[in-house]
């Protein structure tokens, strides 16, 4: 009985010590990942907060931001240490120095580009323990409501759409024997300008569907069109062509007769 109680006491002590180590060093469980979405050319704050206790010596404070193995921003000895900062982040990063003593080691990242996409890690060390925060930066911008245009020509019908967003979406046309064309170009804000179209030759009424999806933001557009052949302009052109052909014959016949008459003479 006494042995059983001793085992329970030892187990309880170990649990308390383990919980204390987790609280101080955050080494007992996977570091949670915060997600931030930012559009190209925008600014974003990558959050990193650490607990401040009365005995914290800020002269020993070390802050290191990394993107994989790339050095994003370093701070120690009471100032920024950017000699080893990657060229990708030169002039784009800053800390909130006036808030360090409040436990704010967050990073301001400006003029965000596609190459900044990915997971960042904030390491903070001082005299009372290490702290570790993960932040996932997703460089993305939802696409605008697509602008749709339908053009009827005698030869064919063209449906076109345009929108702006980032990154590249998936565009699917459901069109019978249609010729599809999709292009992406950068706009002034670093987003993509999407232009997509399908051209069809219709002999009967058809239903055409287009879907645009951006998986990283779970965004999706879907539009359906019912198209009918539009022969009006063709009917106008065909009689005119026949009239023109008839006039040409009327003009040419007398000329041919006169030419034959001169040959006979």
Image (spheres, rainbow, N blue to C red):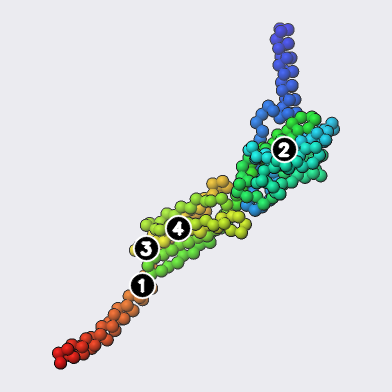
Residue appearing at x 54%, y 46% in the figure = 215
What numbered label is drawn on residue 181? 4
For residue 148, side relative to residue 249 (left or right) = right
Structural crowding at the residue carrying mark 2, measured as other residues with C-alpha within 10 Å and reported as few (<14), some (14–19) or many (≥20) = some
x then y, percent, for residue 209: 45, 56
Q: Going from the N terminus, do you reach mark 4 or mark 3 first? A: 4
Residue appearing at x 73%, y 7% in the figure = 2
Q: Going from the N terminus, do you reach mark 2 or mark 4 first? A: 2
Q: CA distance from mark 1 to mark 4?
A: 26 Å
x then y, percent, for residue 11: 71, 16
What numbered label is drawn on residue 201? 3
Q: Are marks 3 and 2 in contact (CB under 8 Å)?
A: no
Structural crowding at the residue carrying mark 3, measured as other residues with C-alpha within 10 Å and reported as few (<14), some (14–19) or many (≥20) = some
Residue appearing at x 15%, y 92% in the figure = 265
Secondary structure type for disc 4: strand
Q: Are marks 4 and 3 in contact (CB under 8 Å)?
A: no
x then y, percent, for residue 165: 57, 54
Single out the mark in the foreground, 3 or 2.
Answer: 2
Residue 21 position by quadrant: top right
What numbered label is drawn on residue 234? 1
Q: Is residue 178 visible?
A: yes
For residue 71, side relative to residue 75 (left or right) = left
Q: Going from the N terminus, do you reach mark 2 or mark 1 first? A: 2
Q: CA distance from mark 4 to mark 3?
A: 15 Å
Q: Going from the N terminus, do you reach mark 1 or mark 4 first? A: 4
Q: CA distance from mark 2 to mark 1?
A: 71 Å
What numbered label is drawn on residue 64? 2
Q: CA distance from mark 3 to mark 1?
A: 13 Å
Residue appearing at x 75%, y 25% in the figure = 20
Single out the mark in the foreground, 2 or 4.
Answer: 2
Secondary structure type for disc 2: strand
Residue 153 position by quadrant: bottom left
């Amino acid at each position: 009985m006494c042995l059983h109680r001793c085992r329970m006491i030892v187990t309880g002590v170990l649990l308390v010590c383990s919980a204390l180590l987790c609280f101080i060093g955050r080494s007992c469980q996977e570091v949670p990942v915060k997600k931030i979405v930012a559009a190209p050319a925008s600014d974003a704050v990558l959050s990193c907060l650490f607990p401040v206790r009365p005995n914290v010596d800020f002269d020993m404070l070390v802050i290191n931001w990394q993107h994989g193995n790339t050095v994003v921003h370093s701070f120690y000895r009471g100032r920024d240490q950017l000699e080893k900062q990657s060229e990708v982040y030169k002039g784009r990063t800053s800390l909130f120095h006036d808030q360090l003593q409040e436990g704010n080691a967050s990073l301001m990242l400006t003029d965000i580009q596609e190459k900044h996409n990915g997971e960042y890690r904030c390491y903070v060390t001082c005299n009372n323990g290490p702290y570790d925060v993960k932040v996932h930066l997703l460089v993305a911008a939802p696409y605008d409501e697509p602008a749709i245009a339908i053009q009827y020509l005698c030869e064919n019908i063209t449906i076109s759409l345009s929108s702006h967003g980032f990154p590249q979406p998936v565009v699917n046309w459901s069109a019978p024997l249609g010729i599809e064309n999709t292009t992406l170009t950068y706009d002034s804000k670093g987003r993509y300008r999407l232009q997509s179209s399908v051209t069809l030759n219709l002999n009967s009424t058809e239903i055409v569907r287009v879907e645009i999806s951006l998986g990283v933001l779970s965004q999706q557009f879907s539009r359906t069109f019912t198209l009918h052949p539009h022969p009006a302009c063709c009917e106008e052109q065909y009689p005119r062509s026949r009239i023109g052909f008839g006039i040409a014959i009327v003009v040419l016949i007398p000329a041919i007769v006169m030419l034959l008459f001169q040959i006979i003479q």
